[in-house]
Image (cartoon, rainbow, N blue to C red):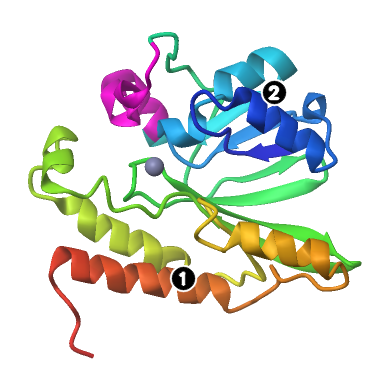
């Protein structure tokens, strides 16, 4: 079983409980795939590896960031000195196609939010029909401020243009099920509630959601940069 991201620091108990409540056994998790190297996504990674023996995967540039500029993981925001960064078992590189059990994931590096942010795509079965799921590993602009980029050795703010390139790189991938990187991205909690109330329908199946969301982030990013396209 694959786990996508490992929750915020301090949420170990909640995450284990949520996995049980969703009908899965956390001991079945063999692979933990981290979307990017920020504490709110990697917080429980080492706990899961120790408890359940899973292997940790992360985009190669973020593994390097852990070693060279650990403060960029936002570990300084954690309230406890017991949290430490870790070495992943494997790193993900652009274009990797990796098989985990019966599922093959196609990976791309989409630098911007962090240098090692990843997007990935894989098939799932919904009511006997094959659907393509897509995950984009980090949408926030909090790391694109001048202050943050200077700290990240990018005083010319090149990361902002790199982020736009990353959105364009995977924009036209066919995705039936858009997986949010935070629950707000795909209204996960509302749609989950809909699934419980109307079990015959799957509100997550929407082959427009991926492209529309990435376009919205592109437009927001143009505004953030202060260069709104005229067309
Ligand atoms: Zn982040």
For label 1, the residue is 213
Asked if the magenta segment contains residue 26, the reply would be no
Q: Point out the image quarter for the N terminus.
A: top right
> Quadrant of the rendered structure where residue 230 is?
bottom left
76 part of magenta stretch? yes
Question: Is 142 placed left or right of 146 in the picture?
Answer: right
Q: Residues within 10 Å of mark 1 (few under 14, many from 20)?
A: some
In the image, residue 138 sits, relative to residue 74, either above or below, namely below
Residue depicted at 69% across the width and 67% down the height: 204
Q: Is residue 3 visible?
A: yes
Residue placed under numbered mark 2 in the picture: 54
Q: Is residue 103 above or below residue 186?
A: above
**Foreground: 162 or 126?**
126
Q: Residue furthest left?
A: 155
Give the x, y percent position of residue 210: 54, 70
* Relative height, residue 192 to residue 80 (above, below): below
Give the number of marks.
Answer: 2
Magenta stretch in the rendered image: 62-80
């Amino acid at each position: 079983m694959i786990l996508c991201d490992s929750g915020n620091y301090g949420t170990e108990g909640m995450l284990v409980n949520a996995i049980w409540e969703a009908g899965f056994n956390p001991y079945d998790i063999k692979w933990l795939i981290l979307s990017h190297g920020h504490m709110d996504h990697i917080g429980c990674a080492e706990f899961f590896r120790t408890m359940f023996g899973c292997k940790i995967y992360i985009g190669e540039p973020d593994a390097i960031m852990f070693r060279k500029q650990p403060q960029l993981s936002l570990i300084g925001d954690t309230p406890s000195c017991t949290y430490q960064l870790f070495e992943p078992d494997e790193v993900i590189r652009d274009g990797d196609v990796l098989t985990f059990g019966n599922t093959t994931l196609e990976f791309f590096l989409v630098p911007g939010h962090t240098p090692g942010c990843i997007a990935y795509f894989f098939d799932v079965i919904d009511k006997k029909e094959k659907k393509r799921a897509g995950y984009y590993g980090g949408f926030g602009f909090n790391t694109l401020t001048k202050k943050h980029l200077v700290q990240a050795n990018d005083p010319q703010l090149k990361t902002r243009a790199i982020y736009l390139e990353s959105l364009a790189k995977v924009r036209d991938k066919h995705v039936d099920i858009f997986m949010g990187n935070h629950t707000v991205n795909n209204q996960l909690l509302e749609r989950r509630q809909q699934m419980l109330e109307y079990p015959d329908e799957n509100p997550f199946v929407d082959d427009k959601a991926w492209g529309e969301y990435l376009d919205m982030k592109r437009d927001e990013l143009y505004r953030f940069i202060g260069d709104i396209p005229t067309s």
